[in-house]
Each structure stands twice: as structure tokens, then as C-alpha cells.
Image (cartoon, rainbow, N blue to C red):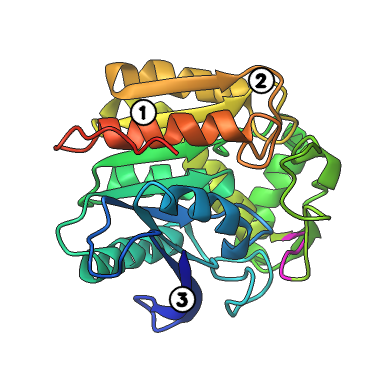
Amino acid sequence: MRMREWILKTGDDKELYAREWQPKSHSAEKATAVVCFVHGMGEHSGRYDDLAEALSEVGIASLAYDQRGHGRSPGRRGHADSMEQLSGDVEMLIGEAEARFPGVPLFLYGHSMGGAVALHTALTRNLPLRGLILSSPWLRLESPPSRVAEAAIGVLSKLWPSLSQPTRIKEAELYRPGKHVVADSPMDDDCHTRITAAMYQAVSEAGRWSLEHGDELKLPTLLLHGTSDRITSFEASKELASRIGSHCNFQPFDGGFHELHHDLEREQLILNLNKWIYTNLDCQKSPPVL
């Protein structure tokens, strides 16, 4: 697998750090599919290197970028002005994928906060996608702030949108350590633990809106969520799956934590992901047997 670094230019002239992973095949051969990753709150594109490598083994290329205010991209840590801004960045990524891999089927993969962004983008923008993949999406939090605190955040998001607070996400809640652990620590120097009032309000409102409008999504959707996720709501994902209906393949992972691609069932998740992607290709190919 070859990983290249590049810059994603946004609609408002920001420059976001990005990565491209090519399949493990001869460079002249065309990728079977392309997966565009949108990472979660406080992390960055580099934490998908292991998953991108697994996809590359079966001929799938990957693109990802550090969202504004994350990783190596500029901006106040954990801040964006609006969901429209974040969705616009996703649209630019899809456009870049089309240009780099013309004619290759595109899939959008969003995890946690990135799942909220990916879902909102798929519902509100006309994108040339073959399918949508949501991993532990932030539709609701498992332990949301009180109503009083939510109301206060709503006011602050207008009066002081860049006000930053700790996310209070504990490393031990991300995944269960095991033989598949990719790194010594779930968080590295490019991660952070901050979120601003505007960002929290934008993602929370988008999650609620997308859940209410889930029945409008006609795109093949793979929805992955662990039953023991302590960060985002498993029950909200169940509700979304019900609203989407026959277009949704909902795969609960019994006992799974928040980051299923790092969790104990990592290998099963990757196998299921590969099969689902290949099932949703026009050619109906079978994924290579490794």
C-alpha cells in the first residue's frame, strides 16, 4: 500500500491536510472502489491508516482528511462554524475522489462525529455515491448534557461560538484492548480533547435532524454500532436503521465499544465491510480471498 499526503482546498479557501491510500496492486490497475473517510471528534485521518491498509488488500483505495480544527489542519481545536461548512468539506473530498479515480464507485464512511457529518451531507447534497457507511454515528450521545446545560450551550453557540470545553471522552471508552490494538495509546499527539459551543450545537442539531429525516435516505447504507458504546447512542442507530428501512444494513456488534475498527471484533468488521462494498458494486464481484 502506498500512502500519499496532499492538501484538500475547501470552498472558503482553507487548506486541510489529507491522505490517499492506493490499493496493493500494480499502479496501472484501476481501484475497484474508493472509500472516503470522515473521522470523529478529536481525532484525525491518520488513525484510519490500519483500516485503509486492510481495504487496500482487496483492491479498494481510500481518501481522508483532517477536519478543520483537527489533526494537521488549521483552525481552533474542535471548532467549525456550522454543519453546512463541514458538509461542504465532504463535498470537496468527494469531488477530489472523482477527479483522482474517474469512473470508480465511491463510498462515504463517517465515524462518530464524522458519521453525523457524512449522514447530513448525504441527506442534503446530491453526491455521486454508491453507498454510505456509518460507524457509531453521533445522532445522540449516550450520556447527553442536562436540559439546562443544553440550553446554555445553545445560547453560548450564538454569543460565544468559539468557547472551548473538554469533550470528557475517556480513552478506555474507545475500544477494548486486545491482540489487534494498532497503537500503544488510542490517542496521539495529533489528537485533542476540545469542542467548542458552535461545534457541539452544529453536530447535535444535525444528528437530531438527520434522525428525523432518515426515511428520506435512499442510498444503500451500512450502519455499524456496538451495543456497549458509552459515547454515542446505540438506540439512536437502531432508530435510524428503522427509519431508513430496506436500504439499511444494520449490523450491531454485541459488547462492542465506540471504535469498532479498533475493537476486539476488528477482523469481523473488516470482513463484513469488504463484503458489503463488493455487494454494492454494479459488477457484483466477490472480494478477494486473502
Q: Secondary structure at mark 1?
A: helix
Residue 103 vs residue 217: left or right? left
Residue type at the position of mark 1? Gly
Q: Quadrant of residue 289?
A: top left
Q: In front: 168, or 36?
A: 36
212 inside magenta stretch:
no
Residue, disc 3: 4
User: Which of labels 1 and 3 is toward the front?
Assistant: 3
Q: Earlier in the sequence, mark 1 or mark 3?
A: 3
Q: Residue 102: x, y in percent?
A: 17, 64
Q: Secondary structure at mark 3?
A: strand
Q: Quadrant of the C terminus?
A: top left
122 w.r.t. 158: above or below: above
Q: Quadrant of residue 170?
A: top right
188 w.r.t. 232: above or below: below
Could you give the CA–CA distance between mark 1 and mark 3, rounded to whole angstroms?
A: 35 Å
Q: Residues within 10 Å of mark 1 (few under 14, many from 20)?
A: many
Q: Residues within 10 Å of mark 3 (few under 14, many from 20)?
A: few
Q: In front: 151, or 122?
A: 122
Task: Identify the disc placed on residue 214.
Answer: 1
User: Which of labels 3 and 2 is toward the front?
Assistant: 3
120 w.r.t. 47: above or below: above
Magenta residue span: 190-194
Q: In front: 32, or 133?
A: 32
Task: Identify the disc placed on residue 227.
Answer: 2
What residue is drawn where x is 32% and y is 17%? Answer: 245
What residue is drawn where x is 67% and y is 58%? Answer: 197
Could you give the CA–CA distance between mark 3 and mark 2, rounded to whole angstroms?
A: 35 Å
Residue type at the position of mark 2? Thr
Q: Residue 236: x, y in percent?
A: 55, 24
